[in-house]
Amino acid sequence: MTMTTQPSQTQPDGINRERLFVASCFALAVSAVAFAVIGDILATLKTQFILSNLQVGYIGGAAVWGFTISILIFGPLCDTLGMRFLLRSAVVCHVVGVLIMISSSGFWMLFWGALVLSLGNGLVEAACNPLVATLFPDNKTVKLNQFHVWWPAGIVLGGLASYGLNAAGFGSWQLRLGLILIPAVIYGFLMMRESFPETENAQAGVGFGEMIRTTISTPLFLLMLFAMFITASIELGPNRWIPAVLESGGIPGILILVWISGLMAVLRLWASGPLIRRLSPTGILVISTALASIGLLWLSFAESGVVAFASATVFALGICFIWPTMLGFVSERIPKSGALGLALMGGAGMGVVGLVAAPLLGQLADGIAHERFASSETILYLERASAFLTAEMESVPADQRGDVSKSVVLIENVLTYNDTEGVLPEVETANAYRAIIGSGVKGEIVDEAEATLGPAENYGGRLSFRFLVPLGIFVTLIFALIYRNDKRRGGYQSQVDKEAAEMRPA
């Protein structure tokens, strides 16, 4: 897979555009590998640490919304601090975040480790989006699409590596997390001694104050920022949950995510230029959000591998071009928004996914899955499970008794709550099943827990996706109105093209 079409040489200004572009691609791949691997291990973390879907959503969300903190703080300062400083800081965050997660003993360390890792992802985006726009000022949207090939490509590589390690018997979640360090070391090495250009705004003499005024006072930018809340939720919210949700239904969810990402990588690499020229950025956004909504709705019905792959294909075609095209649109139509505009767009997208979409989908999944636990049958099962585990307590190895004891306590808490309130507690009931599965005890009781919990988790997760479909339809209408307005004015034009046209003699 080629990353650039530029000649492999340092330019007269001392900037090696090819090396910087390649290094940027590896830096983005770190974020993507982290996204894939964390998505793949969520189910394992849920069982090992007895976490609810909401808690897992917060961990998965922290691995996303930390991006927002760093990109919003450092993105506007990119002109001042320099892109090299931001990328060196990103390497530190990536390494430290992985080490914190690997050494975790519970929810909070997993949460903080994911957050630090995500801070590094935000620093990458804060530096690399304006870097690519600066390196290729006459071809921004196409080059940003090619740069963002390495989001889905990184998910493919990370997802396949994680799946392969697990299938080969080396599937500890700590080892799989370590995969993130490989592209981190590569981009750190590539960028270590390179000269970096100034950003476009710095070269043009656009001051920080003018950049802020342009950004916050332009209605089109504010509209696109609002749209980014929705489009990012539609793309990254479900992708965060697809591995865990489908795996609980017996479908290899990480391979579905790899398939989605592989299609995105191929299309961004080979089709972005021709499609942008033929359809215009706004035309692409209309078609993409419509397809994403259809694919997401269909994915919510995926009870078999065939339906999962078919619906995921439509979903992938929909989400493929949305993120980089929106960044390119803002950079071309509102160029003076500069690094701040790109930072706000990226930060808005990742922030809403991490803080709202991922946890909300988890909370919705908890509530919907709870509907599959029939009260009387569940109580009878938990009473049998408590008795079985209590009897097994003395026969299991000493280092395993703590897990078995914890399972019994969680079961008894559910039964006590039911006796008091007359209903089963929503989160605690599922956690009791997870504790039984994670107790390490073998037997029919554990098999029953897996046979009950898996389909319930799958059902709740799939149906949670449907809550995003109306948002997809709404944002499609927004882009359709922008497209119609462009057509009425003679078609899509970047701000640079528009100003050049106005300067031509009549």
Image (cartoon, grey):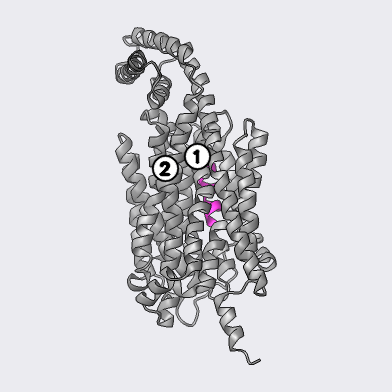
Mark 1 element type: helix
Q: Is residue 4 left or right of residue 360?
A: right
From the image, which quarter does the C terminus lie in? bottom right
Residue at label 2? Answer: 60
- Decide: is 86 above or below 468: below
Q: Amino acid at mark 2?
A: Gly
**Residue 37's spot in the image, x, y percent?**
46, 43
Q: Residues within 10 Å of mark 2 (few under 14, many from 20)?
A: many
**Residue 174's spot in the image, x, y percent?**
39, 38
Q: Amino acid at mark 1?
A: Trp
- Decide: is 16 above or below 470: below
Q: Residue at x 50, y 60 (%)?
A: 25
> What number is the disc on residue 241?
1
Do labels 2 and 1 touch, CB within 8 Å? Answer: yes
**Residue 208's spot in the image, x, y percent?**
36, 75
Question: Which residues are the magenta region?
Answer: 150-161
Q: Residue at x 57, y 76 (%)?
A: 138
Q: Is 230 contained in the magenta span? A: no
> Counting residues from the N terminus, which is met first, the one under dot 2 or under dot 1?
2
